[in-house]
Every structure is written in C-alpha cells, then in structure tokens.
Amino acid sequence: MKSLLLLFGCLSLTTLAADWPQFLGPNRDGSAAASEKPVDGSEEAVTLWKKELGSGFAGPVIVNGQVIVFHRVGDEMITEALKAADGQTIWKHSYSTDYRDSFGFDNGPRAVPAVMDGMVFTHGPEGRVEALKLADGSLVWSFDTVKEVGSPQGFFGRACSPLVMGGKVLLNVGGEDGAGIIALDAKDGHLLWKATTHEAGYASGVVMPGDASVAAFFTRNGISVLQAADGKVLADERFRAEMEASVNAATPLACGDGRLFFSACYDVGAGIWQWDKSKKVLTNVWNKGEALDCHYSTPVWHDGHLYGFHGRQESGAVLRCVSGADGTVKWEAPMSVPGGTLIRVQEKLLVVTERGELWVVKAEPAKFELLSTTQIMGLRHRSHAAFTDGVLFARDSDKMVAVKVK
C-alpha cells in the first residue's frame, strides 16, 4: 500500500509539469500552463546545469523531458536534443549554411523551433525550413524559401518561428508573387498555399484566440488575419513605422476571447484589436503611443493587464504594467535595462534581462514589486526562455542554463 501511495505521489508530481513545445509556450502567449505549480521567487534561483552552445537568438523548447535547441557552430546550423535533467546530448542534426548577418550581428538562427505530433520544425535565418523526427533527429523534409518563393534576407535574416496548426506549418517569409505568408504541409513539406504581398517582419504567427480556424500575423507591413485552411485574407491593416529602418518584432498576444495586442517601437505604438468570429471582421479597441511600445520582446497578459518592456533596446527599456482596457500605465519599474523577455507563472513574472539577470516580479497592477534577482548568464542576449516543472531554461551567446526557481 505504501509503495502504491509513493507511486501515485510521483505520478501526481509529474502531471503538474507541462511541455513548452513552441515559441512562447503551450498557448503561444508567454504564460506557463495552468497546471504548473506557483513559484515563490523570494530566494535566488539555483543553477542545475550549464551546456555549451553555438551562436543564435533561438530560445529552447521542452517536450517529453527533452530540451530542443537550434544553434550554430562554425558553418553548420544544429538542431540538438538535450536531456532536461542534466543537459546531456540525446541527438544532433545539422546542415551547412553560408548565412551572414548584413549588419555584422549574430549569424546564428533566430526562430524558436516548434514541436508537434512527434516532429520538430525549424526555420533558419538563411530561409531553410526543416522537419525532423523528435525521436532521433532524422530529417523528414526540407523546404528552401529562397529558391521556392523568393524570400529575401531583410535586415536581420528570417526570424518567424513556425506556427503549426491544422496539419500545416505557417510562416511569414516575405516571398515574391504573393508569397508573403506561406503554408507548408506538415507531413511532407510541399507548398499548400501562399498569401499577401507583405514583407517579413520578425514576429511569429498565432492562432486567433477563440477561433482555431484563423491565424494572425504581425508582418513588416502590419496586421494580417488569414484563414488557415486556404490562406484567404480576412483582414489586412497597415500598422508600421513610416521610416524604413524599423522592425515589427513583438508577436501578437492573446488578451481574451478574440482579442489580440499588437505593438512596435519607431513611433508605431500599441493597441488591442477585436476579432468578430461570426462576421470575420477585425476592429480596433484602442491604439496609442508611449503606453507599451515593444521593440522585440512579446509581453504577457494576466487578469486584464499587460506586462512587458517599453522602449527601444538602444536607448534602454523599462518594465511596465498597462491596463488592457485602455492602455493606461499602472506602474513602471524604477530601473531601465537594454531589454528583456518575460514568462508568467501563475501570479509571478520571470523576467530575463539582457544583463543576464533573472528577476522574479509580482504580476499585479497595484505596484512594481521585485522579489529576487539572480545573475544566471552572460550579457547582451535576446532569446526567449522556456519554463516547465519549476525550471527555467535560458540561453546566451555561448551556453544554455537550467535554473530552479524556488
């Protein structure tokens, strides 16, 4: 009887943890699964292991006790599976690349992989899309977006993380002849449809909250809402800077049923749009500048409020809480940093700054309350972290770290 109780207890603990299978987590909104245990955060986080990596801004994903990371060593783009428990390599897959960043920045991949139905999908900065078997990393198919649809490099290479929905892999690649957004068959990689003349931004697509048949993208041009089955454009709204040297990089964020938050710097501003599922119409709820202008980091949503970094990386960004009702700023952190990314776990925010710090902050609108700060890695990195079972997985320019958040 005692053995049975012990086994049941272990199984119960296991079921509390959830995978982080894609960019921004289970629901692609930067929030950990509701089944995750809350974190206290009053003490410094403890490093469990470190793993040397190559270059790249692509953060990790976690599935079935494996950490999948996409990085570059020399002239090879590498997809690698690690044991979440200790960081040991399970398998590696690589392909040759000649990608060079036009501005001399990092030459590694930007896009976070996606894992669905036993497959790992990656999107390299040179435009190569691959599907690998999760079990052993073997190649199932690849698709060259440059050769097939004329995807241009843009300012900083291709960065859209694959959105897998309805047996399709959706990507904003900014291709020629109406191939701004494309859908590939998840099983064999052939082109299913192409839509829009939108150039590629650096944000990734999301499933429309409350309407699983529709995808929303924040492209170089602005907001695009499409029917996932055939690529039919349902809404198309310009929302971008007038200046050429600008980017749209924060991914659309679900803010309740049918509501999405879009934001950018360069005098673009931010706002919430409402999707009418029955009428297939997108309308603006509010839109203003200097509320929560996001440079590259996607904020999180909790109990009617947005939490995220406001301001450009070059001049310093500040963590803010903003009302979802009208964009009113509720609080601002008293210190600025070059930038950072966020994950919400229940009532707490796990903030990874470009200084390599992990902040644990209360997700509540009354005031900014910093519970703890831990230096977990090096400086000047922009990748989004992942979280499962009380452990944060993050990376900088040369390593991955797994840290336990108490």
Image (cartoon, helix red, strand yellow):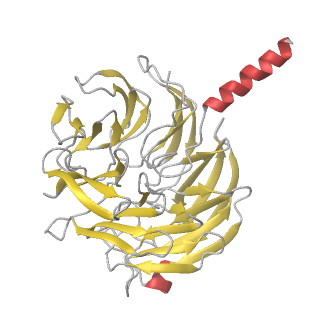
Q: Is residue 42 above or below residue 352?
A: above
Residue lying furthest front: 278
Q: Is residue 329 above or below residue 108?
A: above
Q: Is residue 198 above or below residue 204?
A: below
x, y percentage for residue 242?
Answer: 13, 68
- Measured as percent of width and height from the top left, residue 90 is found at 71, 49
Please tell me which residue lies in front, 56 or 289: 289
Q: Nearer the viewer, residue 7 or 52?
A: 7
Residue furthest to the top in view is 2
Question: The N terminus appears in which quarter of the rendering?
Answer: top right
Residue pictured at 68% horizontal, 69% vertical = 139
Say which of 343 and 60 sits in front: 343
The image position of residue 60, as x and y in percent, is 53, 48
Residue 138, placed above or below residue 357: below
Residue located at (34% from left, 48% from top): 298
Q: Nearer the viewer, residue 341 or 269?
A: 269
Can residue 19 be seen by looking at this rendering? Answer: yes
Query: With 227 as the anchor, is 328 left or right in this view?
Result: left
Q: Is residue 157 at least partly visible in the picture?
A: no
